Amino acid sequence: MKIYKVTDPEFTNYGRIIEGYEAEKKAIEDALRDKTPVPEGTDYVAEDKALQELPAAAKITNSLFGGSPMQFGWCNGHNTKLNCLEYHRSSEINLGATDFILLLAKREEIVDHKIDSDKVKAFFCPKGVMIEVYATALHYAPCQAHKDSGFQVLVGLPKGTNVGKPDFTPGNDEDTLLTATNKWLLAHPESSEAKGGARVGITGKNIDIAGDIQ
């Protein structure tokens, strides 16, 4: 699979690089590296106290979400597969203490709540580079960028995202994709999420970039 870079023009359809705030990005990167684990699988924490209480996190909130309350968590581990695609009604902020790769598609490419995995593109993001992944971009857990290392990636979202699940009666078909607060999910049939009851919405192969990284 071709792996683009977040500096390539193709990334502008999915997100942008956030300029400035170099000292704050370095503080967050250091906290990710020193205070968050790298499990053998993939783990996600919506809000991590060590990140949330950083002065750097408070400072960049105004820039990232215009002062609206944010949560700073992480997604760390080892992964090379697509498995699922999700979207939020908001952008997501990512910053790696390691290099990482995102598998992304466009929400507009969903048809009848299904999308073929051949619509997915891979983007390499170097450690220390902060990016905004637009609300219109489908994404999921990062992938490791190198065979011999995992990934440690900041996940910045509006406060309350991915925490619990609203208890309500679905009023339309999209509502059945909601798996957590502000999280709509399409699963590949081979994924553990699908086996756990998530709505199957990805057709084609379950992308695995293990053979594309060094």
Image: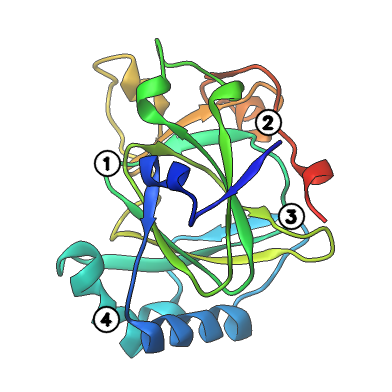
Q: Which residue is mark 2?
A: 191
Q: Earlier in the sequence, mark 4 or mark 2?
A: 4
List x then y, in percent, for residue 206.
Answer: 70, 27
Label 2–label 3 contact, CB within 8 A: no
Q: Residue at x 15, y 70 (%)?
A: 67
Q: Earlier in the sequence, mark 1 or mark 3?
A: 3
Query: Which dot marks residue 41?
Result: 3
Chosen colour scheme: rainbow
Q: Which residue is mark 1?
A: 89
What secondary structure is marked by label 4? Answer: helix
Does residue 144 lie above or below 207 as drawn?
A: below
Q: Dot 4: within a 10 Å radius of its alpha carbon, few (fewer than 14), some, or many (20 or more) residues?
A: some
Instruction: Compute the Cα span from label 2 to label 3.
Output: 14 Å
Does residue 9 lie above or below 127 as drawn?
A: above
The residue most toward the top is 112
Q: Earlier in the sequence, mark 4 or mark 1?
A: 4
Q: Amino acid at mark 1?
A: Arg
One can see residue 159 in this view: yes
What secondary structure is marked by label 1? Answer: loop
Q: From the image, which quarter does the C terminus lie in?
A: bottom right
One can see residue 180 in this view: no
List x then y, in percent, for residue 74.
Answer: 51, 65
